[in-house]
Image: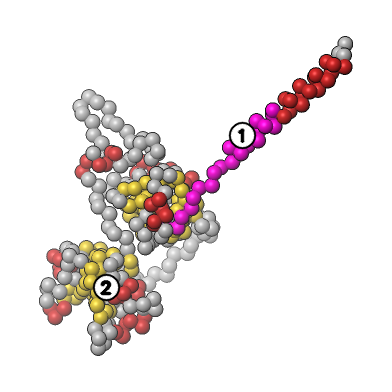
Amino acid sequence: MMNSTSFMNSKSMMRCVALISVSVWLPLSALAQETELPAFAVTDIDAIRTAIGTEAKVTGVVADTGKSRSGHNFLDFAGTEFNVFVPSSAISKFPDGEPADVYRGLEVTFRGEIAEYNGKPQIVLNSPDQVTVAGGMPTPPTDPVPPPPDTNEEVEVLELIDASDQTAVVASAGKKARVRGFVSESNKTATTGANFLNLQDSDFTVVIFGKALTNFTGGEPATIYKGKWIEVSGMIELHQDDAGRPQIVVESPDQIREVAEPKEEDPPSSEPTASPGEPTPSIPEGPKEVDWRDYFEK
């Protein structure tokens, strides 16, 4: 039979166990809460640079995308050096399609470690869990889209030519094409107000006559595009039949757009090789354990 002293000791022990349980549970619960990551806009490049080596969120509209021959995807944004890289080994993890195709033109938040490559900050995307699309992914139409009426008109696909390839540009004179280059110089005439954009490492000129400037509501092209990479489409002409002075006359803003700086092609040694008799090394997934760049720079 329990006496009064034993009973009191038993109650005191129960209180101590309860207090210990509460004191242990509280910090564990606090640790269980996910720490909020710092968030940046893609244009806040200085703040993004201070976060290199740490995990963060970066939000922006994917303005342009590209793919390398080995299957890597690149996502670029206007007005910033920040970019998102998707290694080819991760492409199959995205059920909606390749990120270069799916996310172009969408406002997206990317989560991951801020890394630096060739002096530019980036996030390496290895999983769709790192991506949040503003408003959610576009819902595909449930009803089948009727085929367009047969107008017997073929869709015109224009060849893309680099402005520095003078031979290719001149050879395309008299044809419609897309020409890409960096606007190193720009000017306008004092009399008619015509704008001229000169592309670097070439004799190619983009011409916007004064009467067409009223279509550019965002400002004069000579100011807007100076110091930027552009892509211009239209008929390639030779000024006064001079093969050394090719040009495209732009009459509408739809003919010219800002693009990201072209990516360099992967080096020949991009695929790791092994000596005869040795197993071929695999590229581990995940930037935190092994940096994928180690396999492409050595």
Q: Position of residue 65 (x, y in %)?
A: 35, 56
Q: Count the labels in the image.
A: 2
Residue at x-position 31% and y-position 85%: 211
- Residue range in magenta is 20-42
Q: Which kind of residue does numbered mark 2 sit on? A: Gly
| Residue beneath disc 2 | 234
Q: Is residue 41 magenta?
A: yes
Look at 38% across and 35% down and name the residue there.
289
From the top left corner, tell me how far across and down residue 129 is, in percent.
Answer: 48, 45
Q: Secondary structure at mark 1?
A: helix
Q: Residue furthest top?
A: 1
Compared with 298, 234 (above or below) is below
Report which quarter residue 292 is drawn in: top left
Q: Residues within 10 Å of mark 2 (few under 14, many from 20)?
A: some
Mark 1 or 2, closer to the camera: 1
Relative horizontal placement of residue 139, taking residue 225 as reference (left or right) = right
Name the amino acid, label 1: Leu
* Residue 244: image tag: none
